Amino acid sequence: MALDYPQSLKYADSHEYLHLNGDMATIGITAFAIQELGDLVFVDLPEVGSTLTQGEKFGDVESVKAVGELYAPVSGEVVERNEAAIEAPDSLQADPYGQGWLLKVRCGTDPDLAHLMGADDYRAKVGG
């Protein structure tokens, strides 16, 4: 099955994606990561008001076969977390880039995105 990697997003080596809109970043995990993990059973995310540091762990996603650590693609303050994803982790599989987002983070107007890949580079990395 061919996986989707929207061109409007940036992708981290650790399989998080980022959508930047002004000073707000929406963070989630890629369809590839979800496929590799399998059936998701638990999502652990930081509380609203928490501070993320780029490159540092901010949470976990658990499946029946593995635990995946989540790493912040940008630094900033968590302003919203997807409670629906926490309550029903399997919902991430249906729409990872839409309703399946994890966090919304205020990251400022000029975050460092140099370490992130475009969709074509990420697709080449994961073989999709």
Image (tube, rainbow, N blue to C red):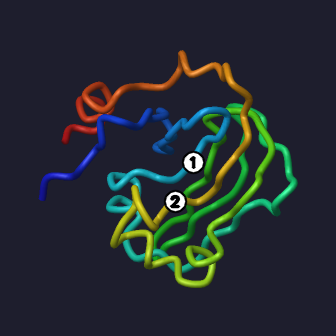
- Asked if the residue at tag 1 contacts the one at tag 2, i.e. Cβ–Cβ closer than 8 Å, the answer is yes
In the figure, is residue 44 to the left or right of 27? Answer: right
Q: Position of residue 17 (x, y in %)?
A: 48, 43
Label 1, on which residue? 26
Q: Residue at x 76, y 54 (%)?
A: 79
Residue extending farthest front = 22
Q: Position of residue 23 (x, y in %)?
A: 67, 34
Kind of element beneath mark 2 = loop
Kind of element beneath mark 1 = strand
In the figure, is residue 91 to the left or right of 44? Answer: left
Label 2, on which residue? 101
Q: Where is residue 2 in the image (x, y as percent from the top left)?
A: 14, 52
In the figure, is residue 72 to the left or right of 21? Answer: right
Residue extending farthest top = 114
Q: Residue 74 carries which label?
A: none
- Name the amino acid, label 2: Trp
